[in-house]
Each structure stands twice: as C-alpha cells, then as structure tokens.
Image: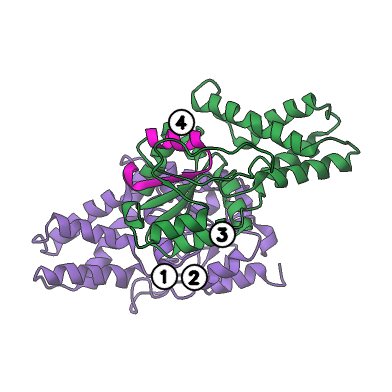
Chain colours: A green, B purple
Amino acid sequence: MGVDAVDAVVFDVFGTMTDWRPSVTDALAGVGGAAGLRADWAAVADAWRLRYGVTVGKVANGQLPWQPLDDLHRLMLDEVLTEHGLNALGEAERDSLVRAWHHLRPWPDAAPGLELLHNTPVVTATLSNGGVGLLARLTKQAGLRFDCVLSAELARSYKPDPRVYLLAAELLEVEPRRLLMVACHPNDLEAAAKAGLRTAYIPRPLEWGPDAAPVDPPAGVDLVAEDVVDLARVLAGPGR
Amino acid sequence: MGVDAVDAVVFDVFGTMTDWRPSVTDALAGVGGAAGLRADWAAVADAWRLRYGVTVGKVANGQLPWQPLDDLHRLMLDEVLTEHGLNALGEAERDSLVRAWHHLRPWPDAAPGLELLHNTPVVTATLSNGGVGLLARLTKQAGLRFDCVLSAELARSYKPDPRVYLLAAELLEVEPRRLLMVACHPNDLEAAAKAGLRTAYIPRPLEWGPDAAPVDPPAGVDLVAEDVVDLARVLAGPGR
C-alpha cells in the first residue's frame, strides 16, 4: 500500500505516538513523593491505564454517558489510589495527576515520521480518545506536526465506537476506504477496519515497560510498519 | 495585551490568512478561458464573495438549515454565473471552481507569524467557516502551521453565530475571555467580542483589490496589529 492508496492518515496518540508510562509514572512519583508517600509508581500507572480500556469501552457501547476524558481519568485515579492505599492525596494533587495525560513524551520516531508525511499529499490527523484541547497542547509541546486534530470528543463517544472512525472520514471529506488508521493496539485497528477504514499496525513493545509480553499484529491489517518513520517511508516509497 | 493574557488564539482564514481574490480570480479565468468564455473575472470573484456574508448569515441566524460550505459556494456560484451570462459552464467546471476555495494563497506574513506563535505557550487554531477537511488541506498546502483546526462546521453553523466562538473555547478548554479571535473583518470580531472573546484586528487593505475603500478597525477591539508577524511580536513582546 502506498501514499496514493489513501488520502489521509489518522493516528492513535496514547501509546502509539507517545510513551505514556514513564510520563505518568514520573508524575505519580513526583506528586506522591512530595506528599511523603511511597509506592511502586509504575505499577500504579499501569493499574490506572489498565482501567482505561474498560471504562472508555462502557462509554463507547452506551453503558455510560459521554463525559470528558479528564473526568474519566479522575474517576479511575480515585479507584486506583484507594486500591493502593494512597488516599492521602488531595484534590489539587489528583487534578495535577489527571493533567499528566496532557504532557506525554513522544516516541523518538513520532515527530520525524510526521515531518516526512507532511511532505506527502496525505493529510495527517490525530484520532484519539483525548479531547481536542488536550491533543492541541500535547502535540504542540511534543513537537508532533499533524495537519489536523481530531478527537473522539467530536463524536461525543470513545474509540472503539465506529462513529468515531466514521466521523473522522466525514470531517476530513475522505472515503473510509481511503483513510488509514495507525495504532499499536489491535482492538483500535479491528474497530477501524470494521468501520471500513484501512489499518496500519506499529508495534510499541515498550508501551507497558521492558517486561511486557509482545503483542501480535491483528489479523487482516493492511500494513505493518516498524515505527512512524518506517510508515512514512513505506507510504511514500517506490512500491506505492 | 500580551501572550500571558490569553491561552489560545483563533484565526479567521478567508481574507485574514489567505488572499482569496487572486486565487479565485485565477481559477475562474482558467476554467472560463478554457471554456472559451470572456469576463471580468475579478468582478465575478468579487460578486461571488459578496454573496457569502449574506448567505452564511442566513445559516447563522437560523433562516437556512446548515449545509457544507462547498454546497453554499456552489449555490452562490450558480447565481453569479447566471448574472454574468456564464451559464455555459458545466457541472465539472463548477465543482472545480468550488474547490478553488480549498487552495488559497496565504498572505506573506501568515506562515512566519504562525511559526513565531508556535514558539510561545499559546495554542493557535483556525476558526473559519470553511470545513475541517478544507482547512486541513488548505493550511497544509499553504504551509500555515496551526496547532489545531477548528471550523464552524463543528457547531453546524457559521460565524457570526455566537455558538461557533463558544464551541471553540469549549473544545480548546479555555475561558472565552482568554481566547483571542484574529480577523480582518469587523463583523467577525464584533460577534466574537459579544460572545466574550478577546479580539485582534489585522487590516488586509488588498483583500478586495487595490481600489477597495479602507476598512476601519471595529470599535472596542482589544488589539490592532499590522499583520500576523506583528501580532506575534506584540503578544510575545516585552510589554506583555
């Protein structure tokens, strides 16, 4: 598949473009340490993130009403802090931790890969469960040059709700089959494919830390790339 | 007013960031000339654009149902071509002319001004009556680096409907009084101010060609800048 097979490429952000684990672990360690608390902060970060799929899934399938991701992050954080005996953290500290998801470090290939794609005719955009404001600030600070910021917020739902993927195609004015979804999470790509999009898998073996089990590419994915630079090369390459 | 008085800056695009008149005139002359037609193409472009404010205003105030800007441009074009005796132009030619609004030349200060603002903490976004897809392609091709693409389409209305300005503040998660609207059109700024935004006026004396009457800044505007580079310097300047 080459760049002439698609008109636009949309990217997952948490995990695919950014390395949330050390960013969130550092925030927890900083805020928790300043409050005199001790914990395995990476385990707390993992526990927080593990609740994420289930919680946004409930919004995506209609079990929970839509609410901003910051509010969902706060609900999940409260539960995780209770589980880990960290209830000494106050309101301001919890709010500050929720904001840690607004300032995530990019994977090293993300910015150069986007710059390569910027010089092709395809339009690039985020397609994340983060809100528009979060994504605008995160991508600016991380130096991630997207042509457009799209969020599940615009569909007032969350991925993997098919409406999120279809709204991206509608807003970008491209046919779903000419829109490529890029992610490191098989469930995101499977949902995008069901909605009629093309899909590209990028492995992020370090997303859950150095000891995590490897993730297989989902069956039926249109393209597997090593990282965003490799994706840009494949899309722009001579084989297109 | 300095950069610390605002959290985000949103920009009008047609006229304020892009010089639509020669772009659209050239498209008309190209398509019309190829069809063997002769006309004062700049006058046709002006007539087309003159209908714009009235037409989008009817959507903004609820007289007309929302529809994409391409469809409104097409309706207005059909009327203007009839008025100018240019009905020989066919469907494909008319569609191609509507697409001329997707590829407008930027004013020379627009890209460098946005690059200066990119290096400040404020978030920049479009806030245009153009659709999301149009804006993503236009800004990419014109080299206009915005942190976010926002469109009246997301409110399913058009400026000067106050809901457009308020939705921009909501999506960017900023208070309206900390959101600066930049435009060369007084009615856009007056509507933004009524919605509670701060406003900056940039004159574009050549928008309607070299013989147009000068436009006065609207009363009560918070800031007047020479162009986008000047705006960035004022916002980032020592007087902030």
Q: Amino acid at mark 3?
A: Ala
Q: Give the residue displayed 67% in from the left and 50% down from the top.
A: A103
Q: Residue B82 lies in what quarter of the image?
A: bottom left
Left or right of B62? Residue B185 is right
Hey, which quadrant is residue A49 in on the image?
top right
Q: Amino acid at mark 1?
A: Pro
Q: Earlier in the sequence, mark 4 or mark 3?
A: 3
Question: Residue B34: x, y in percent?
Answer: 13, 70
Residue bearing the label numbered 1: B106
User: Residue A112: where, in percent of width, then height?
Assistant: 54, 62
Corner quadrant of residue B53:
bottom left
Q: Which residue is mark 3?
A: A111
Q: In the rendered image, which quarter contains the C terminus of chain A?
A: bottom left
Front residue of this view, candidates B20 and B117: B117
- Separation of disc 3 and disc 1 at Cα? 25 Å
**In the rendered image of this protein, does residue B103 appear above or below residue A52?**
below
Q: Which chain contains the residue that carries disc 2? A: B
Q: Which amino acid is tagged 4?
A: Asp
Q: Which residue is mark 4?
A: A161
Residue at (44, 66) in percent of width and height: B16
The magenta span reads A174-194
Pick the residue in front: B2 or A2: A2
